[in-house]
Amino acid sequence: MQLSRRAFFKYCGAGAVTIGLSSSELGLLQAALASTGAPEVIWLKGSSCDGCSISLLNRIAETAPATAADVLINNIDLTFHTNLMTFAGESAVAVMEQAYAKGNYVLVVEGGIPMAFNGHACISYSYKGQEVTFKDAVLRYAERASHIICAGTCASWGGIPAAGSNPTQVVGVKSLTGRTTVNISGCPANPDWIIWPIVQVLLGNSIPLDSSGRPTALYEAHNYIHKSCPRKERDEIDDFGTDNRCLKHLGCRGPETKANCHNNWNGIAGQGNWCIGVNAPCHGCVEPTFPGPESFFTEYDDD
């Protein structure tokens, strides 16, 4: 599926403040998208729930393009994505192989990578009569990618598929490839977080990363969720089901999780579709330890 670069520019323009673009950067982005030399994007998916793709598709803005459908129908440039392509089967893989031959594309990986059974716990596609595991697909397309972006916690470090006994031996992309990855963590990742590093690549900007491979601008630059939480000064509760009260004693990981969830999810602090906004504790889904036991019930001192 080919989505026009013009609509990608419109998409980014509609959310410029959210993804941290100045007016001058928007002008540079428009020029980059007009260039025939702009990098292609290959999106591979492995052990996941498709949540990050769904997150991206559920994006809603107040200005055009208002929805992901508007973007996709009128426009973006995506070489390969199993849910969004008009091509299917070997024809779709052939298009991806053309991008591989040229190199210099952006590889987006969604989902963890099973290593058990020599990778055969997850088959990515068939090509020329041969099954290709997700493990081998990621290794191959990581070779010639200019940048590798991990969409979500699963691709970044294993996430839920790697939880517990991890019977399929799921790992993250960097663990498999040894290459630097831009980890856009979250379960799911916010749609504007996913767009942000692609925009930086198109602008030719460097992407400073924290010790976990996450862009500092999206994670480390923000304070702990607890400090920005609209419930911070409210009474703490010990039972679920009470509105507008602090959830610290119910295992909320806001005191140790850095992200801008309260602004990015629907953009309204205390409301909308972020965990605390719907009366649930923060589970720390942007952290490498998610979903360890501490993701659900954690005790904190009364400070």
Image (tube, rainbow, N blue to C red):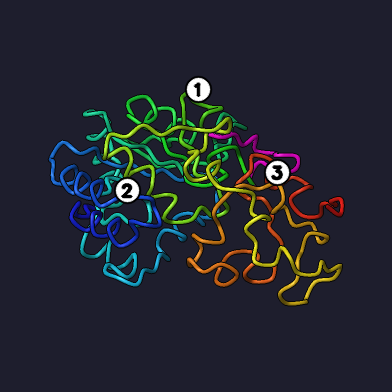
Q: Position of residue 131 (x, y in %)?
A: 43, 37
Which quarter of the picture shows residue 121?
top right
Residue type at mark 2 is: Gly
In this image, 265 relative to 234: left or right?
A: left
Task: Name the disc covering residue 89, or none.
Answer: 2
**Residue located beneath label 1 in the image:** 178
Q: Residue at x 44, y 28 (%)?
A: 139
- Frontmost residue, 70 versus 93: 70
Q: Is residue 227 magenta?
A: no
Label 3, label 2: how many angstroms apart (C-alpha)? 31 Å
Label 1, label 3: how many angstroms apart (C-alpha)? 22 Å
Q: Do the residues labelled 3 and 2 touch (CB within 8 Å)?
A: no
Q: Is residue 170 magenta?
A: yes
Principal SS element in the magenta part?
loop
Mark in the foreground, 1 or 2: 1
Q: Residues within 10 Å of mark 3 (few under 14, many from 20)?
A: some
Which quarter of the picture shows residue 288?
top right
Residue type at mark 3 is: Ala
In this image, 154 relative to 79: left or right?
A: right
Q: Residue at x 49, y 44 (%)?
A: 184
**Residue located beneath label 3 in the image:** 163
Q: Where is residue 87 in the image (x, y as percent from the top left)?
A: 26, 52
Q: Position of residue 235 (x, y in %)?
A: 80, 69
The relative height of residue 242 versus residue 175 in the rendered view (above or below) is below
Mark in the foreground, 3 or 2: 3
